[in-house]
Image (cartoon, grey):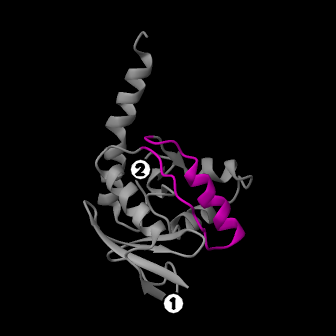
Amino acid sequence: MYYFKPIVTVVGELKLVASDRGLVGILWENDDPKRTRFLPQTRHDEHPVLQETARQLMEYFAGERRFFELPLDFVGTDFQKKVWQALVTIPFGETRSYSQIAREIGHPLAVRAVGAANGRNPLSIIAPCHRVIGANGKLTGFAGGLEIKAFLLALEAPQAALTLAEEKQPG
């Protein structure tokens, strides 16, 4: 059984989906229904994981949160789970290419498969697939759309630069 809660954010309405084990999805307003399948679903606005996810997302959008502390329940193939787990390790304000992710998970020739798994990532923002870009530095596909991907990267960039500047200050 899956539970959902819709929330309104600066990037539009998101549908948060959880199982009894943790967060399974953050779905976009115009998401392709075939991209993820978490059925059946029951609306449960008071579900503790969904409430905590909503709170942490709002902090992220306000520039007050750099990482998420949520129980995640990845639902996919073993390969997809490896890719999604690698996404969670990309530091705030940084990006990686598909080939870097492929090497990181031990499948250096599986760049296209990494791209496909990235495209099916059900936990947008939390498993930050927006931080994965083309090897040429260009923005590539994103379930929320390229404008939102650019927005999320811009949201993180000034904070990452500020953190770096603070670290270089003499103490």
Q: Secondary structure at mark 2?
A: loop
Decide which of tag 1 and tag 2 comes sooner along the chain: 1
Question: How far from the left and from the top, in percent, is residue 67?
Answer: 47, 47
Q: Give left or right: position of 133 versus 166.
A: right
Q: In the image, which is nearer the foreground, mark 1 or mark 2?
A: 1
Give the residue furthest to the bottom: 40
Report the residue at 31% width, 46% height from top. 155
Give the residue furthest to the top: 170
Residue 39 lies, with reference to residue 130, above or below; the image says below
Residue 156 lies, with reference to residue 127, above or below; the image says above
Question: How far from the left and from the top, in percent, is residue 34?
Answer: 48, 84
* 73 falls in the magenta region: yes
Residue identifier under label 2: 138
Question: How far from the left and from the top, in percent, is residue 43?
Answer: 40, 83
Toward the viewer: 39 or 152?
39
Stretch of the chain drawn in magenta: 66-93
Q: Assign the magenta stretch its main secondary structure.
A: loop
Report the residue at 36% width, 66% height from top. 144
Whether the residues at callouts 1 and 2 have beta carbons within 8 Å, the answer is no
* Type of the residue with mark 1: Pro
Which quadrant is the C terminus positioned in?
top left
* 116 falls in the magenta region: no
Q: Residues within 10 Å of mark 2 (few under 14, many from 20)?
A: few
Residue identifier under label 1: 40
